[in-house]
C-alpha cells in the first residue's frame, strides 16, 4: 500500500495548492535559466545568421554591437582585394526609438549591402526579401509591423515587404532590415529645419569654397532626398563583413587585414566572445545569482511545507510505529511525498512556462541540458527538504499514539 | 502451564525521573492472562494502568521485571530480548479510547496496512481485512474514512486491525470511554467473542463498571500496584478473582 499516495488523496486540495505554489516558484527558476539562454542566443544570433568569417571594424573599437564603429565605404573594396576573400559586404547597425501608434517603439536597424545582399538569408515567415534599393524593409514580427504596412521613419516611408521571426538584437529589440543607404538615411535623419539651416550653411561655405565655385552643380546635390544625402556627406559604415573563400585560411586573411592601420579585425568566434564577455557577462552573473537564490528559497519553502505536512501526520506516524511499521515505511511516506511534490511542481513549472514564457518581452529559451539540470536540482532539493520532516518523524514515539 | 498463558508479567517496575524527581509509576506488577481470557483492569486515574498497558505492550518498556508472551521471554530487566517493533507487529494488537485509526486510510485500509506490514501481499491482505470487517459487522463501511464512521464503528475497525495478525495479546485502553453505554457494552462483548473465538488474551483498562460482568477476570490497580479485584467488585459482578 502506498501510504504517500493515500495521504495525498486524503488531502488532495491542500496538496494541489502546495504543488501549484512550488510549481510557480520552480517556473521562475526555470525562467531565469531560460532568460539567460535567451540573452546569449539573442546576443549571438546576428553573428551566426550573417555568417561572416571576419568582421572589420574601426581601429581599437570592439565592433558594431559593443560600441560605435565607423569605417569608410571603400574598406569593402579593399577587403575584396585580399587573397582568399570571397565576398565583403557593408554593414550598418544602429538602434532607434520612434513612436508607433502612439507608443514608443525601439528597434535595431541593420543595413543590407544592396545589391549583393537583399536579405535572402533572413528567416522569413511572410513576404519576401528586398526587391529595390530604397523604401522597402523586412521587419521582425516582434517589432509589431504588419506585412505591406507603410512605416514612416525620418522623412521617408518604408513598405514592410517581409516578416522574420526571432531576429532580435543583443539588447532584445526587434530588428528591421533595409538597404545600407536607407539605414544611413534613418540614422542620420535630421529635422527639416536643421536641414534647411545646414543647407544654408553649406551654401554659405560653398560661396567661398573653391570646389563649389569651380563646380556649381554640386550645390544642387543639397536639395536631394534625405536618403541620398549621405552620398554627399561621405557616410560611414559600422563594419565590413567578410566571407572567406572555401579552402582559404580565415586566420591568414585576418592577419593580412590586421596589418592595416585603420581597422581592427575579429574572427566570428572573436566577435561572439566579445559579445558574450562584454555585453552579456554581467547580466549572466546577475541571473545566475538570482537563480541560485531562488533555488535555495524553493528548497527552504519545500522543506517547510514537508515539515508541516509531517507535523500534521505525527499521530498517524505514531500509530504506524505502534502497529509495528518499520522506519523505512515512515521514511518512504515522507520521501515519496517530497519527490511527488518536486516532480509535480516541476511538471507544472514546465507546462506553465511553455504557456507564459512566449509572452515575456524578452526571449526565454528552455534548452534540454538546462531542463535536465533543473530536474536533477529539484530531485536534490526534494530529498534535502524531506530530511527535516524525516528527522521529526523518526523522533516520534509509538506511545504518542495513545495521547489522542 | 506457560504455553497456556497468553501473557505473563513478573515484578514489573516503571520509574520515571531520577533522584529527587524520581516517581515510581508501577511497582511489582505481576499478572497472568490465559489464552482466550478477557481481563479487566480497574483503577482510579493516575493508578498506573496505562503505564502497565504500555509496558506490557512493549511500547514503553518497564525499568525492570520480566514479560513473557506466549511463553517466550521477550523482556528481562532493562533489556528487550526481541526486536520490539517487529514483535509488536506480529504478536500484540492495540485498541484505544479514540484516534485509533490512521485518518488518511479507509476502514479497510486501516486493517489492510497491519497485514501488509506483517508481510501479506496486498491482495491477500485486502481479502483478510474484508473478512475481519465482516466478522465485526462493519464491512459496509469498508471504504469510508475514519471521519465518516461513528465512534462504535471506529472501535470495531480498530478491533479488526488488532485481530489482523492473530496476535497472542490484545490490549485495550478505555475503549468504551467515548461511547454511550449501549455501544460500550457491544464493544466489550465483542472483546469477549474475540478472546474466546480467537484465543487471544485480552486486557481491557476500563472505568465502566456496568460491563464488568462480561469479563472473565478483574484486576485493580492503585498507586502502581496490581491486585486481584476486591471482594465487593467480584461479588457484585459474580467474577472469579
Image (tube, coloured by chain):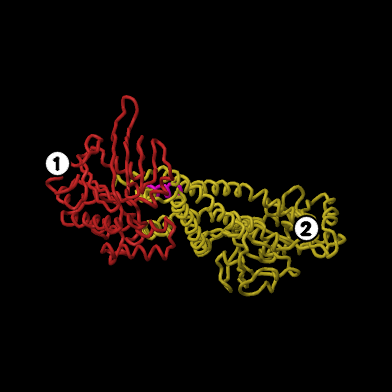
Hue used for the chain lettered B: red
Residue B11 falls left or right of residue A92: left
Extreme residue in the top direction: B20
Hue used for the chain lettered A: yellow
Expressed as whole percent of the image width and height from the top left, the position of residue A360 reads 52, 59
Q: Callout 1: few (<14), some (14-19), or many (20+) C-alpha neighbours within 10 Å?
A: few
Would you name the residue on which mark 2 appears?
A54
Q: Callout 2: few (<14), some (14-19), or many (20+) C-alpha neighbours within 10 Å?
A: many
Instruction: Tell me which chain the residue with mark 2 is part of.
Output: A
Expressed as whole percent of the image width and height from the top left, the position of residue B83 reads 44, 45
Instruction: Tell me which chain the residue with mark 1 is part of.
Output: B
Residue numbers of the magenta segment: A302-311
Residue B72 counted in the magenta span = no
Where is the C terminus of chain B found, in terms of image quarters? top left
Residue plotted at (25% across, 36% down): B225
Helix, strand or loop for disc 1: helix
Residue B51 falls left or right of residue A12: left
Prevailing secondary structure class for the magenta stretch in the rendered image: helix
Would you name the residue on which mark 1 appears?
B231
Extreme residue in the right direction: A83
Expressed as whole percent of the image width and height from the top left, the position of residue A378 reads 53, 53
Residue plotted at (18% across, 55% down): B185
Residue A306 counted in the magenta span = yes
Residue plotted at (87% across, 61% down): A83
Mark 2 → mark 1, Cα distance in angstroms: 111 Å
Amino acid at each position: 500500500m502506498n501510504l504517500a499516495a493515500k495521504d495525498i488523496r486524503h488531502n488532495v486540495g491542500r496538496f494541489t495548492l502546495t504543488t501549484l505554489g512550488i510549481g510557480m516558484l520552480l517556473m521562475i527558476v526555470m525562467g531565469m535559466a531560460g532568460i539567460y539562454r535567451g540573452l546569449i542566443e539573442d546576443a549571438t544570433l546576428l553573428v551566426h545568421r550573417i555568417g561572416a568569417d571576419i568582421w572589420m571594424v574601426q581601429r581599437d573599437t570592439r565592433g558594431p554591437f559593443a560600441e560605435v564603429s565607423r569605417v569608410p565605404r571603400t574598406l569593402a573594396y579593399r577587403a575584396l582585394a585580399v587573397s582568399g576573400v570571397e565576398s565583403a559586404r557593408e554593414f550598418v547597425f544602429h538602434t532607434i526609438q520612434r513612436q508607433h501608434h502612439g507608443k514608443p517603439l525601439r528597434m535595431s536597424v541593420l543595413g543590407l549591402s544592396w545589391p549583393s545582399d537583399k536579405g535572402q538569408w533572413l528567416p522569413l515567415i511572410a513576404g519576401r526579401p528586398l526587391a529595390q534599393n530604397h523604401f522597402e524593409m523586412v521587419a521582425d514580427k516582434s517589432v509589431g509591423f504588419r506585412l505591406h504596412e507603410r512605416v514612416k521613419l525620418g522623412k521617408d516611408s518604408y513598405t514592410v515587404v517581409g516578416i522574420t521571426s526571432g531576429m532580435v538584437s543583443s539588447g532584445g529589440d526587434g530588428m528591421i532590415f533595409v538597404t545600407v543607404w536607407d539605414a544611413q538615411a534613418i540614422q542620420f535623419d535630421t529635422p527639416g529645419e536643421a536641414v534647411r539651416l545646414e543647407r544654408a550653411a553649406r551654401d554659405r561655405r560653398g560661396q567661398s569654397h573653391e570646389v563649389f565655385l569651380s563646380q556649381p552643380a554640386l550645390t544642387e546635390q543639397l536639395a536631394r532626398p534625405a536618403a541620398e544625402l549621405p552620398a554627399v556627406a561621405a557616410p560611414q559604415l559600422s563594419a565590413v563583413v567578410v566571407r572567406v573563400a572555401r579552402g582559404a585560411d580565415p586566420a591568414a586573411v585576418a592577419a593580412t587585414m590586421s596589418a592595416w592601420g585603420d581597422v581592427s579585425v575579429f574572427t566570428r568566434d572573436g566577435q561572439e566572445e566579445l559579445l558574450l564577455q562584454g555585453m552579456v557577462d554581467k547580466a549572466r552573473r546577475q541571473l545566475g545569482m538570482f537563480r541560485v537564490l531562488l533555488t535555495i528559497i524553493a528548497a527552504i519553502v519545500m522543506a517547510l511545507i514537508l515539515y508541516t505536512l509531517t507535523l500534521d501526520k505525527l499521530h498517524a506516524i505514531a500509530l504506524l510505529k505502534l502497529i509495528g511499521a518499520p522506519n523505512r515505511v515512515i521514511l518512504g511516506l515522507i520521501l515519496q511525498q517530497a519527490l511527488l511534490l518536486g516532480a509535480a511542481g516541476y511538471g507544472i513549472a514546465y507546462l506553465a512556462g511553455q504557456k507564459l514564457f512566449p509572452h515575456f518581452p524578452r526571449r526565454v529559451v528552455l534548452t534540454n541540458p538546462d531542463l535536465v539540470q533543473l530536474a536533477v536540482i529539484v530531485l536534490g532539493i526534494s530529498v534535502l527538504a524531506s530530511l527535516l520532516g524525516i528527522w521529526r518523524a523518526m523522533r516520534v514515539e509509538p506511545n504518542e499514539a495513545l495521547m489522542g | 502451564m506457560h504455553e497456556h498463558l497468553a501473557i505473563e508479567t513478573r515484578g514489573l517496575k516503571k520509574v520515571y525521573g531520577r533522584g529527587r524527581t524520581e516517581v515510581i509509576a508501577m511497582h511489582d506488577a505481576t499478572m497472568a492472562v490465559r489464552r482466550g481470557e478477557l481481563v479487566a483492569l480497574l483503577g482510579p486515574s493516575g493508578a498506573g494502568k496505562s503505564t502497565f498497558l504500555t509496558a506490557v505492550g512493549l511500547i514503553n518498556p518497564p525499568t525492570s521485571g520480566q514479560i513473557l508472551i506466549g511463553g517466550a521471554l521477550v523482556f528481562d530487566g532493562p533489556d528487550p530480548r526481541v526486536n520490539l517493533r517487529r514483535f509488536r507487529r506480529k504478536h500484540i494488537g492495540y485498541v484505544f479510547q479514540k484516534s485509533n485509526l490512521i485518518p488518511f486510510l479507509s476502514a479497510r485500509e486501516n486493517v489492510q496496512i497491519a497485514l501488509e506490514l506483517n508481510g501479506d501481499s496486498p491482495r491477500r491482505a485486502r481479502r483478510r481485512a474484508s473478512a475481519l470487517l465482516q466478522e465485526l459487522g462493519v464491512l459496509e463501511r469498508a471504504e469510508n474514512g475514519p471521519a465518516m464512521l461513528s465512534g462504535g464503528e471506529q472501535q470495531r475497525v480498530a478491533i479488526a486491525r488488532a485481530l489482523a495478525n492473530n496476535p497472542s495479546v490484545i490490549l485495550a485502553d478505555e475503549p468504551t470511554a467515548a461511547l454511550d453505554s449501549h455501544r460500550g457494552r457491544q464493544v466489550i462483548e465483542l472483546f469477549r467473542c474475540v478472546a474466546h473465538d480467537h484465543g487471544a488474551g485480552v486486557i481491557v483498562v476500563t472505568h465502566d463498571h456496568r460491563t464488568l460482568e462480561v469479563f472473565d477476570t478483574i484486576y485493580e490497580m492503585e498507586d502502581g500496584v496490581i491486585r486481584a479485584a476486591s471482594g465487593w467488585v467480584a461479588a457484585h459482578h459474580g467474577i472469579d478473582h
